[in-house]
Amino acid sequence: MTTKTYQLETVSCPSCIAKIEGMLKKTKGIKESEVLFNTSRVKTTFDENVIDSEAIRSKIGQLGYKVLSER
């Protein structure tokens, strides 16, 4: 398992959090995810044999959120 934190450009409301978390929870290979509203970060634990970080960034981007960095 790998855990990464993605810094997003903005997460402006509780429905944004629900939208991102809902999509990630349905994504194969992602075991856990949490959106931190006050810092606009997404912390995700995933199985790198099933999904990679670039695919997670892409999925977040498809929802309209820009990933600025990851660590």
Image (tube, rainbow, N blue to C red):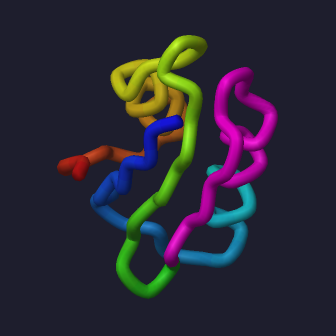
Looking at the image, the residue that sits furthest to the top is: 49
Residue nearest the observer in this picture, 56 or 15: 56
Residue nearest the observer in this picture, 66 or 6: 6
Q: Position of residue 58 (x, y in %)?
A: 42, 25
| Residue at left offset 76%, top offset 42% | 25
Residue nearest the observer in this picture, 5 or 69: 5
Q: Does 12 appear in magenta?
A: no
| Residue at left offset 39%, top offset 71% | 40
Residue 27 vertical placement versus 50 (above, below): below
Q: Is residue 2 left or right of residue 16?
A: left
Residue 10 vertical placement versus 4 (above, below): below
Q: Position of residue 34 (x, y in %)?
A: 61, 64
Q: Position of residue 13 (x, y in %)?
A: 59, 76
Q: Is residue 44 left or right of residue 34?
A: left
Q: Is residue 29 left or right of residue 52?
A: right
Q: Is residue 51 left or right of residue 3?
A: right
Q: Does 30 appear in magenta?
A: yes
Rendered image quadrant of residue 61: top left
Residue nearest the observer in this picture, 15 or 53: 53
Q: Position of residue 70 (x, y in %)?
A: 24, 48
| Residue at left offset 39%, top offset 32% | 57
**How many numbered discs?**
0
| Residue at left offset 71%, top offset 68% | 15
Magenta range: 21-36
Looking at the image, the residue that sits furthest to the bottom is: 38
Rendered image quadrant of residue 52: top left
Looking at the image, the residue that sits furthest to the front is: 1
